[in-house]
Structure formats: C-alpha cells, structure tokens
Amino acid sequence: MYGFIVRRLVRRSFRRLSAGDYETVLKQFSPDIVFCFSGEHALGGELRGVEPTRRWFQRIYRLFPGIGFEPQAVVVNGWPWDTVVATRFRVRAWMSGDRPYSNEGMQLLRLRWGRVVEDRIYEDTHGLVEALRYLADRGVDEALEGPLTEGKEVA
C-alpha cells in the first residue's frame, strides 16, 4: 500500500512540474535537500538546499518554456523512514518555438517520512547539450552558462 501511495504522489509531482508548478514540488523537499543533475552544462551540478534548487527549476523553465515530464515507470522500495524511488521519464519541450526537444532519463529519489532528502537526475547528456547549443545559437546565452552552485552561477 505504501508503495502505491508513493508512486501516485510521484506521478502527481510530474504532472505539477509539467504545468510549471515547481513551487508545490519544492515544498516536498527537505530544507537540506541534495539535488543533482548529471553533467557539466547549464543544468548540471550538485546543489544543497531548497533555494539553490529553486534557481535550478527557474533556469530549466527559462530555457525550455512549456517543458513536460512524463513518468514511464516508477519503482518504490523501502519504508517511510528510508524510501528509494526510481523513475524512468521522458521530457519534451519546444526550443525557441520552432524545434522539438525530446529526451529521456532516470531519477533517483530518497525520501524520509515523506520528504525528499536527495534527488538525482540522469538525462541523456549528449541530447541535452546539443539542445543547449541549439538554444545558444539562437541567442539564448544562459544555455551556455556553467552549472549553478549554492551561492551563485558559475560561468
């Protein structure tokens, strides 16, 4: 039963993210969340804390307005005090309004008593970096910036 509830909550969070409602999702994060998106690019890096993670969400929605996330499979293991959730997902967006972006990835979450304490995302980096270069070629300078850090962005 617990696994069913967690899977339902994860799918609901993906729907909220697809609607642009990352603030509701951030409320599920522990204040000392460890958020990691693999790769050395504008969306890459490891962040600690809700505020740096909020800046990451703000960046992804600036780079890919209207982005949508579709969970393909959600696997839950553990108990309420130590839960691991693995999600295979697809992401879709329009870049600069004229070219589709589609990619897939994996997310590994760790939960403690319903709060996300760790969120690690592994998306096909090659496809993402190509998309970021495409955006940069069309004047979206932020697409070539370095990963975010806790205190400031790295150029």
Image: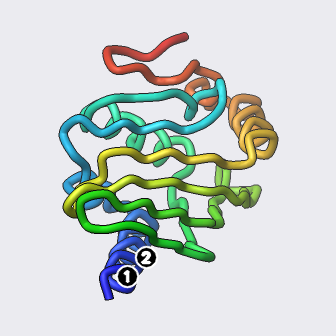
| Figure quadrant of residue 134 | top right
Name above or below for residue 120 compared with residue 82.
Answer: above
Q: Residues within 10 Å of mark 2 (few under 14, many from 20)?
A: some
Extreme residue in the bottom direction = 1
> What quarter of the picture does the C terminus occupy?
top right
Colouring scheme, one of rainbow, by chain, secondary structure, one colour: rainbow
Extreme residue in the top direction = 155
Query: Along the horizontal axis of the image, is 102 left or right of 42?
Result: right
Q: Which residue is mark 1?
A: 8
Residue 105 placed where, x, y %?
A: 66, 56
The local secondary structure at tag 1 comes to helix
Residue 119 placed where, x, y %?
A: 43, 47
Label 2 – label 1 distance at C-alpha: 5 Å
Name above or below for residue 149 compared with residue 52.
Answer: above
Residue 122 placed where, x, y %?
A: 63, 46
Q: Which numbered disc covers residue 11?
A: 2
* Circle 2: residue type: Arg
The local secondary structure at tag 2 comes to helix
Name above or below for residue 124 compared with residue 106.
Answer: above
